Image (tube, grey):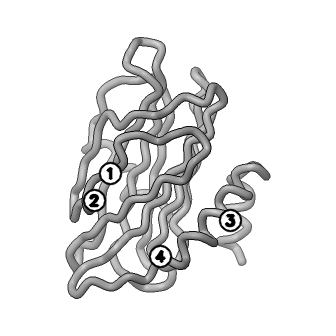
């Protein structure tokens, strides 16, 4: 109950609707077991106002890797999925960054996650998000912030107004949204 209230307080009505729709579709694909591995079902949604396609600009994997790769682009309004597999006991721990361009006015959105096991509850699940101006990523700092986070995260950039949110749903389902 408290978990549902935390997610509800974090998301706008539009974002809640996206989250519920993605979860409904992702539940059919979750629960895949690979012996000795944790499998994360990642779902990314781009709802930025100018309807730009977001391009991957950076990624980092502390434990495991995307199979086959993180999506190269996030088209506007579509749910783009990826699978991340990590060994037990470390689990899946990675991050990916998307941007709406490469010039000095471009914005970026980051999601980092750690799902240590395939259990159907939030046992150690963590997610961290950022949004802001384009620039280099210090993955060591991201890991510290990720390790201090919980299963839900939201961030609004006070300068550019970009917003990133993410929730890890039981069953190793990651849902992240990028907007402005």
Q: Is residue 34 left or right of residue 30?
A: left
Structural distance between the alpha carbons of marks 3 and 2 = 24 Å
Mark 2 or mark 4, which is nearer the start of the sequence?
Answer: 4
Residue 36: quadrant of the picture: bottom left
Q: Residues within 10 Å of mark 2 (few under 14, many from 20)?
A: many
Structural distance between the alpha carbons of marks 4 and 2 = 16 Å
Q: Residues within 10 Å of mark 3 (few under 14, many from 20)?
A: few
Image quadrant in which the N terminus is located: bottom right
Mark 1 or mark 3, which is nearer the start of the sequence?
Answer: 3
Residue 53 appears at what percent x and percent y? 49, 32
Mark 2 or mark 3, which is nearer the start of the sequence?
Answer: 3
Residue 102 appears at what percent x and percent y? 37, 19
Residue at 24 percent across and 79 percent down: it is: 37
**Can you identify the residue that label 3 sits on?**
20
CB of mark 2 within 8 Å of CB of mark 1? yes
Residue located farthest toward the top when viewing the structure as drawn = 104
Nearer the camera: disc 4 or disc 2: 4
Residue at 39 percent across and 34 percent down: it is: 55
Reply above or below: 3 against 120: above
**Can you identify the residue that label 1 sits on?**
70
**Can you identify the residue that label 4 sits on?**
29
């Amino acid at each position: 109950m408290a978990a549902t209230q935390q997610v509800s307080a974090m998301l706008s009505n539009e974002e809640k609707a996206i989250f519920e729709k993605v979860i409904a579709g992702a539940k059919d694909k979750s629960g895949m077991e690979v012996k000795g591995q944790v499998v994360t079902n990642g779902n990314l949604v781009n709802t930025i106002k100018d309807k730009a396609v977001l391009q991957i600009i950076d990624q980092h994997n502390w434990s495991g890797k995307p199979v086959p790769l993180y999506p190269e682009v996030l088209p506007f309004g579509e749910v783009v999925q990826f699978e991340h597999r990590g060994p037990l006991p470390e689990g899946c721990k990675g991050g990916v960054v998307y941007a709406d361009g490469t010039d000095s006015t471009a914005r970026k959105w980051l999601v980092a996650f750690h799902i240590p096991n395939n259990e159907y509850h939030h046992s150690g699940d963590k997610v961290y998000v950022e949004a802001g101006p384009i620039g280099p990523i210090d993955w060591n700092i991201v890991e510290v912030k990720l390790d201090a986070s919980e299963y839900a995260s939201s961030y609004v950039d006070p300068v550019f107004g970009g917003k990133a949110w993410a929730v890890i749903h039981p069953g190793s389902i990651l849902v992240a949204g990028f907007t402005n």
